[in-house]
Image (cartoon, rainbow, N blue to C red):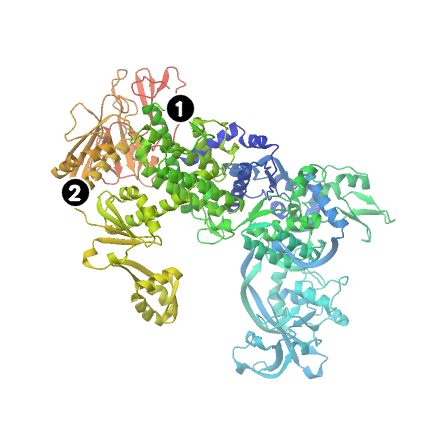
């Protein structure tokens, strides 16, 4: 099964039937299930984080749609803001705001429009390839004028309720993008950097008691020192005056922070101690004279505040109030600055010093650090200079260091509604819950007023018109209102369309002009519930009926982003949360746990993984990962491969086996299988295992429904894996003979019906999770459905309700115990190296629960067959078999933890009694010599004491103790060898591509011992291979299909399969050509390819040895030229290629020469006159398939007279 190719066929099918559109049409009139899709930027390609979130969204919305809801799914695009502007700034070489004004805002915004949807087609292709159903045609873009108009309406509601004000605030500021950032943006890109760390002296003045004494402050931002206006100490901490022995000076610093300057106590002498409050009010000499005049109004004073800690520095913090949030708060509270006073902020929008800092004017602040330190050293104010490595915030877009800077901004009041935010947060349901209760709630508790304006150009303009004196402000809430107030009509409301518009003053202040700012793009995305509907101007009823959203989902990083802005605006506007249910996924990381990086190429490209394994495998891998529980996922390709190997392949094989047996029923029994889903009921025709798998399936449906109601996707896949294991490794395998019809038509029909019900039910249940595979199953299975409407797609159906009458928990428990016994017995066989083919005398099951043993007894037949034993014994008497447990301490783990004590502890563990070990296993730990030892630090094993019981191999789990009698007698050896012979024959049939109903003869030649074994076990062998074994070589004229020789244990065996009549494969001798094609098959790791040795049939022109190697290398995608073997002999350039006809070559040495009678791959013949060419249509088997059209192009069938045939006899035209 080529899963990726099958998925592409399903995509074509969905497109041909307009599947998504029709699913919405069919759902019209149903209750609405409201979903909001967070808008991504289209300026970059989607990564695994987007794919994970998209898969979660698609799974939940598909599930809702298949449970009777109408689910509108519209894709959204974030079009404004820094991601777009930064790209244009790089493109046009813009470094400062003046550059934009020089080219003009209209041209600048047009450049933004040109690139904003650069990757939109790539997004659509990838999202669609992942199987996600979402509306790209009826999308929303934040740059649509109707979307922007709703953003204006949202803002006006806030303005009219007094929640908008203008102020300035110390904010994270990107000098690379010339704009402030919100606090949640500032937290997105921290890096470890090395910065200067300096200790600077501040001589105390106007105090005779402290004459000549200096306060010492520490900072990692020397560039803020020119703007220093105060110092701050902790009011309750102890500070000391010390004499520095080396410098012969007196300093004051926190006692706990003496270590910041001194390594030993001999370097200083403490002369006095103070509380922080004792230092409050001290005056000091300014470092620079730029703002010396501020001393007249209280600056250059020691203040107190508890934000000063003993964690770093000297315990005295220098205050530059316009470059630090705490600095600003403390200085404002102490009157050093006022809200409407002069700003001491000599840094421009590009991060360069301005006047009056004349010594560093024009220098970028970070670059000025060195010059500032040099000047401090010259003025003898620099006491110490080191460097420090610490985590520092960088701009998430320009990747430049952020600074904290006071900037004027328009704010939305948030601090006054914190209690409402917390209350509304409690009304929503989150998965995982801890993100809501901890991370998000803690963020809400500390929420600050939101600076919603940005000094940029490409965005939704703030709809504020203001008089020159700032006294009169008008907030516009719509395009119609703007026309009413200004007299001007506009269709677009970007800056170039509205900046020139004025509104006459109603207070005699001339005209009002629009402020220059635009909205923070987070304000736009937070407004999307309203703006995507153009609320309240359109779809008012639809919005109000579906708000709040039933469901949203994004990554954990959105706790400070989209989740936050949604809640703030919905609380402010409507007093309720914007969503009811939320899934918050963790981050997808590289396999080593580092951040995925295109530069480092530390992760496989998503498109390559999908092309290799299919979208369903990626979807299920992501849904089953820790990321759906809010944790990080270390992405590993092996994990996707394992989903394919452990889930999809066995699941598909069970489906294929079902289809094969439905076809066999009709072909051999004349029974046309039909399933009536509505009227089907369980009858006495269904055996115990039928009832079990039906019950297990219905219990799984019940479980999945409960988990999906709780939005716990991550619990579903483990149960699905268990279901696939139960279906394939237990039900199908244990009922294979019934399904083949060995037990009669009626019993076969019951088994087939059971398998159909299970696979059909699970196709519907799993459709939201694995939409492609479910559709593949359904498109075929619907052909035998009667009694209900056959929909075009499984996704048009409803998820089935569990059928309670089919659920039997007692049967499920009994089979679970049976499985436990069988698995324990298999492990015991493996320990004694006893293959399952060899029958053993007895298996004993020990358990003190009579009910347990009764259930095991009821399934005696299955246990005996699965373990291949002659008898089953059950008992409650453990002592009768002298079974006990022994324990051994994990010396490595205990040694690391307990050091020297581990030796005695391990010795004591080795002497623990059976009862003590049982206690350890029951409670999970035990006290040993005063130390707590965990069960994970102890290895236990079961032993059977006494020579009379040594033939038993014990094994146990939490359910049972199983003893396997491992004695093998001669009859067991004979039966085991017979099963080995059977196995060789069946493998040979499979290798030859034969079907169970192919009419063949089986010949064998063997050593005497094996001949006797076959004779003794003829009935056993014949029941499996369905043919008698003929102990002789085939006749000279027989058509040999395949022949192989080798060893069974130490005995020689050669098996040859021949065709009877013309029922196998194709007849190569033809009247039309008189020739047969020359070919060889190539075997590698379970895959088989075909190489045509004589491309033009009968021409005598064979390919060269070099061409053969080149073709094999290309077919199997090998890095080097292959080493081909004919049995154990290496094929070389000296060999005649014609002699390889009908041979199975191997890549790597084999033991015997294997032959074949037909190509493994499909071959088509192109005939033109007498010339016939052979064309291989797939290579290896099942891969790289060509259509008939492609074959026709290769064969130049557009030429007159050239035709394609399926057979060399040229009797079956294509």
Q: Quadrant of residue 368?
A: bottom right
Horizontal side, residue 508 vs residue 416: left or right: right
Q: Residue 942: x percent and y percent?
A: 28, 58
Q: Nearer the viewer, residue 175 or 1004?
A: 1004
Residue 1183 in sight: no
SS type, badge 1: helix
> Where is mark 2, residue-wise?
971
Identify the image quadrant of residue 227.
bottom right
In this figure, which residue is indicated by the disc labeled 1? 1188
Q: Is residue 127 left or right of residue 1087?
A: right
The secondary element bearing badge 2 is classed as helix
Pick the front one: 878 or 464: 878
For the view shown, which residue lies furthest in the right direction?
508
The image shows residue 1136 at horizontal and vertical percentages of: 21, 30
In the rendering, at what x and y percent does residue 379 appear?
A: 64, 73
Q: Quadrant of residue 1006?
A: top left
Specify few, some or many for label 2: CA neighbours under 10 Å numbering under 14, 14-19, or 20 or more.
some
**Relative to the observer, which residue lies in front, 499 or 2?**
2
The reply to whether residue 131 is visible in this rendering is yes
Q: State the mark number for residue 245.
A: none
Q: Is residue 507 left or right of residue 341?
A: right
Determine the residue located farthest toward the left in the rendered image: 1008
Q: Calculate the distance from the C-alpha at mark 1 to the C-alpha at mark 2.
A: 55 Å
Q: Quadrant of the C terminus?
A: top left
Are the residues at dot 1 and dot 2 in contact (C-beta closer than 8 Å)? no
Of discs 1 and 2, which sits in the foreground? 2
Task: Indicate which disc, 1 or 2, sits on the residue closer to the N terminus.
Answer: 2
Query: Viewer-proximal residue, 485 or 879?
Result: 879
């Amino acid at each position: 099964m080529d899963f990726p190719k099958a998925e592409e066929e399903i995509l074509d099918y969905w497109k041909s039937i307009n599947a998504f559109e029709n699913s919405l049409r069919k759902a019209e009139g149903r209750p609405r299930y409201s979903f909001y899709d967070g808008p991504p930027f289209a300026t970059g390609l989607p990564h695994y984080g987007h794919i994970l979130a998209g898969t979660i969204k698609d799974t939940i919305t598909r599930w809702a749609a298949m449970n009777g809801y109408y689910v509108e799914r519209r894709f959204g695009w974030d079009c404004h803001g820094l991601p777009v502007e930064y790209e244009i700034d790089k493109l046009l070489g813009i470094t400062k705001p003046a550059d934009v004004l020089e080219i003009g805002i209209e041209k600048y915004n047009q450049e933004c429009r040109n690139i904003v949807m650069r990757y939109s087609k790539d997004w659509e292709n990838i999202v669609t390839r992942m199987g996600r159903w979402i509306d790209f045609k009826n999308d929303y873009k934040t740059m649509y004028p109707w979307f922007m108009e709703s953003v204006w309406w949202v803002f006006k509601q806030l303005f009219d309720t007094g929640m908008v004000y203008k102020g300035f605030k110390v904010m994270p500021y990107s000098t690379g993008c010339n704009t402030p950032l919100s606090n949640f943006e500032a937290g997105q890109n921290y890096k470890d950097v090395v910065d200067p760390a300096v200790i600077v002296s501040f001589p105390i003045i106007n105090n005779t008691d402290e004459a000549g004494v200096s306060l010492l402050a520490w900072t990692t931002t020397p560039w803020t020192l020119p703007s220093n206006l105060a110092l701050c100490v902790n009011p309750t901490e102890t500070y000391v005056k010390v004499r520095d022995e080396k410098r012969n000076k007196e300093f004051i610093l926190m006692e706990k922070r003496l270590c910041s300057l001194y390594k030993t106590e001999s370097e200083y002498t403490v002369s006095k101690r103070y509380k922080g409050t004792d230092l409050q009010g001290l005056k000091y000499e300014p470092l620079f004279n730029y703002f010396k005049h501020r001393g007249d109004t209280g600056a250059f004073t020691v203040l107190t505040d508890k934000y000063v800690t003993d964690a770093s520095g000297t315990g005295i913090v220098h205050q530059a109030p316009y470059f630090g949030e705490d600095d600003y708060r403390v200085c404002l509270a102490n009157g050093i600055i006022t809200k409407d006073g002069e700003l001491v902020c000599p840094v421009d929008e590009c991060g360069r010093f301005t006047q009056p800092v004349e010594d560093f004017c024009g220098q970028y602040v970070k670059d000025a650090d060195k010059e500032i330190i040099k000047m401090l050293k010259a003025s003898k104010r620099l006491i110490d200079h080191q460097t420090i490595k610490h985590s520092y915030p960088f701009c998430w877009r320009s990747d430049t260091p952020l600074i904290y800077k006071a900037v004027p901004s328009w704010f939305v009041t948030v601090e006054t509604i914190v209690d409402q935010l917390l209350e509304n947060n409690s009304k929503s349901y989150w998965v995982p819950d801890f993100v809501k209760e901890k991370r998000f709630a803690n963020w809400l508790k500390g929420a600050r007023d939101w600076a919603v304006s940005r000094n940029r150009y490409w965005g939704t303009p703030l709809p504020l018109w203001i008089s020159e004196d700032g006294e009169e402000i008008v907030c516009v809430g719509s395009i119609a209102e703007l026309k009413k107030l200004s007299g001007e009509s506009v269709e677009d409301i970007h800056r170039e369309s509205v900046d020139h518009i004025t509104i006459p003053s109603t207070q005699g202040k001339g005209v009002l002009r629009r402020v220059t700012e635009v909205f923070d793009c987070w304000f736009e995305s937070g407004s999307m519930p309203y703006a995507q509907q153009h609320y309240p101007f359109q779809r008012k009823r639809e919005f109000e009926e579906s708000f709040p959203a039933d469901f949203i989902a994004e990554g954990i990083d959105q706790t400070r982003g989209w989740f936050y802005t949604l809640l703030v605006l919905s609380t402010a506007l409507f007093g309720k949360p914007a969503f009811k249910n939320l899934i918050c996924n963790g981050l997808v990381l590289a396999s080593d746990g580092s951040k995925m990086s295109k530069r480092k190429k530390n992760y496989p490209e998503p498109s390559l993984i999908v092309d290799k394994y299919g979208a369903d495998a990626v979807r299920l891998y992501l849904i089953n990962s820790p990321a759906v529980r809010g944790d990080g996922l270390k992405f590993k390709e092996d994990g996707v491969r394992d989903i394919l190997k452990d889930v999809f392949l066995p699941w598909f094989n069970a489906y294929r086996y079902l289809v094969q047996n439905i076809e066999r029923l009709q072909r051999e029994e004349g029974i046309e299988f039909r399933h009536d889903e509505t009227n089907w009921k369980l009858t006495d025709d269904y055996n115990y295992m039928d009832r079990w798998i039906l019950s297990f399936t219905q219990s799984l449906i019940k479980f999945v429904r409960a988990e999906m109601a709780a939005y716990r996707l991550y619990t579903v896949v483990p149960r699905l894996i268990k279901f696939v294991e139960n279906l394939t490794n237990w039900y199908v395998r244990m009922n294979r003979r019934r399904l083949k019809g060995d037990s009669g038509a009626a019993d076969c029909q019951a088994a087939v019906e059971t398998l159909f019900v299970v696979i059909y039910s699970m196709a519907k249940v799993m459709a939201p999770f694995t939409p492609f595979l479910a559709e593949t199953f359904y498109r075929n299975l619907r052909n035998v459905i009667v009694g209900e409407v056959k929909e075009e797609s499984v996704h048009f159906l409803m998820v089935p309700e569990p059928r309670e009458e089919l659920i039997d928990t007692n049967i499920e428990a009994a089979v679970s115990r049976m499985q436990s016994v069988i698995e324990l017995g298999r492990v015991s066989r493996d320990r004694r190296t006893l293959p399952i083919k060899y029958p053993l005398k007895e298996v004993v099951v020990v358990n003190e629960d009579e009910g347990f043993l009764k259930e095991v007894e009821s399934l005696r037949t299955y246990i005996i067959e699965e373990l291949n034993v002659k008898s089953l014994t059950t008992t409650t008497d453990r002592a009768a078999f002298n079974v006990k447990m022994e324990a051994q301490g994990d010396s490595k783990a205990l040694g690391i933890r307990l050091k020297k004590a581990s030796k005695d502890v391990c010795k004591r563990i080795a002497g623990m009694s059976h009862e003590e070990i049982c206690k350890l296993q029951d409670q999970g730990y035990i006290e040993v010599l005063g130390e707590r030892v965990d069960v994970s630090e102890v290895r236990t094993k079961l032993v059977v004491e006494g020579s009379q019981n040594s033939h038993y191999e014990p094994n146990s789990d939490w359910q049972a103790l199983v003893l396997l009698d491992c004695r093998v007698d001669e009859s067991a050896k004979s039966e085991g060898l017979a099963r080995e012979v059977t196995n060789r024959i069946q493998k040979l049939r499979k290798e030859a591509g034969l079907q169970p109903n192919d009419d063949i003869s089986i010949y064998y030649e063997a050593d005497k011992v094996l001949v006797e074994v076959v004779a003794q076990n003829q009935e056993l062998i014949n029941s499996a291979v369905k043919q008698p074994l003929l102990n002789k070589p085939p006749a000279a004229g027989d058509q040999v299909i395949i022949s192989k020789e080798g060893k069974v244990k130490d005995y020689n065996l050669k098996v040859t399969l021949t065709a009877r009549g013309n029922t196998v494969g194709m007849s190569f001798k033809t009247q039309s050509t008189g020739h047969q094609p020359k070919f060889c098959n190539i075997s590698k790791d379970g895959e088989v390819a075909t190489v045509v040795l004589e491309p033009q049939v009968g021409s005598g022109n064979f390919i060269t040895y070099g061409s053969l190697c080149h073709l094999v290398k290309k077919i199997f995608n090998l890095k080097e030229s292959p080493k081909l073997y004919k049995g154990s002999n290496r094929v070389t350039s000296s060999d005649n290629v014609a002699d390889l006809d009908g041979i199975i070559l191997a890549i790597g040495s084999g033991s015997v020469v294997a032959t074949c009678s037909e190509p493994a791959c499909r071959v088509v013949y192109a005939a033109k006159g007498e010339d016939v060419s052979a064309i291989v249509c797939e290579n290896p088997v099942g891969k790289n398939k060509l259509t008939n059209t492609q074959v026709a192009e290769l064969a130049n069938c557009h030429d007159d007279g050239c035709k394609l045939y399926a057979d060399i006899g040229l009797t079956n035209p294509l």
